[in-house]
Image (spheres, helix red, strand yellow):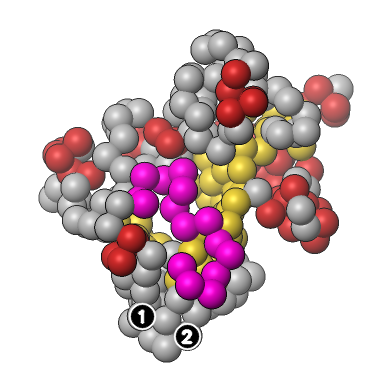
Amino acid sequence: MPGSDAKIGEDDGINKDSDYYGKVFDQMLNLWQTNNAVKKIMLDENIGKMVADLAGWEGTRIWHDQALIKRPWANPTSWHLDTPFWSFSDKRAMSIWVALDDATYENGCLYFIPGSYHTTTFENPGIGKNMDAVFDFYPQFIQSKSLAVPMKAGSCSFHNGLTIHGAGANMTNGFRRAMTCAYMPDGAKFNGTKNILTDEQVNKLKIGDLLNDEIQNPLIYSNAKKL
């Protein structure tokens, strides 16, 4: 996008039709690797424990963080799943979503299809122009009632990576800024999808290898530390 250094949807399959998708959100990945303030928050052991307790696993590793910025008058983010984009396949994977501005009905708060993660799979409809494309893959939810989740700045939500979710358009002249982070269980294995990994990293991996690189995917919480 002119005047922006953001990576816009590079790993989320929304590079086509850039005139449209460039106005969905600006996306900046792995800020924890370059910004100590972000690192301190996203790698906080307390968050790692909350994720472990919610997901039901023993150890939490970071997958990636990202800033998601809806500019004034931005397009909606269509219904999608998170986990199918990632380089591991685990039904328990979770994301935290932190509102940096008030997320409102008017500026593009999140919407969820509650409970959808119980029956969705790793089939990936991507993030397309059509809000209802996900229901071609998961028609059982086409009659479901969505849940809007407006949040005050500084608030957060957690969601399973297989939960169907999206965000509304920004119908205001202000920004809607958010920070998210994806977390995976210790022991997650490479599934062959590149996602955020570099060519060099992928070339060193075989399907089934552990994603346990402490530089790329540090362990931020483990029950073992408490024994």
Image position of 147 (left or right of 145): right
Find residue 202 and report its image quarter: top right
Which percent across, then down, holds residue 58? 68, 25
Q: For the residue labelled by badge 2, is the local secondary structure a helix, a strand or a loop?
A: loop
Q: Is residue 55 left or right of residue 34?
A: left
Q: Residue reaching furthest front?
A: 2
From where the camera sits, is residue 208 visible?
Answer: yes
Q: Label 2 crowding class (10 Å Cα cut-off): few <14, some 14-19, many 20+?
A: some
How far from the left and from the top, in percent, is residue 104?
Answer: 42, 77
Q: Residues within 10 Å of mark 1 (few under 14, many from 20)?
A: some
Q: Please tell me in which quadrant of the rendered image residue 204 appears.
A: top right
The residue shown at (71%, 34%) is: 216
At label 2, which amino acid type do we have?
A: Gly
The x, y position of residue 153, in whole percent, is: 59, 74
Q: Is residue 89 located in the magenta-colored stretch of the structure?
A: no
**Disc 1 + disc 2, Cβ < 8 Å:** no
Q: For mark 1, what is the residue?
A: 73
Disc 1 marks a residue whose amino acid type is Trp
Residue for point 48% across, 20% down: 192
- At x 42%, y 81%, the residue is 72
- The magenta span reads 1-15
Residue 174 disc label = 2
Write the residue at 58% across / 28% down: 199
Tell me the quarter of the image containing the C terminus: top right
Is residue 7 inside the magenta stretch? Answer: yes
Left or right of 180? Residue 14 is: left
User: How far apart are the alpha carbons under marks 1 and 2?
Assistant: 8 Å
Towards the viewer: 23 or 223: 23
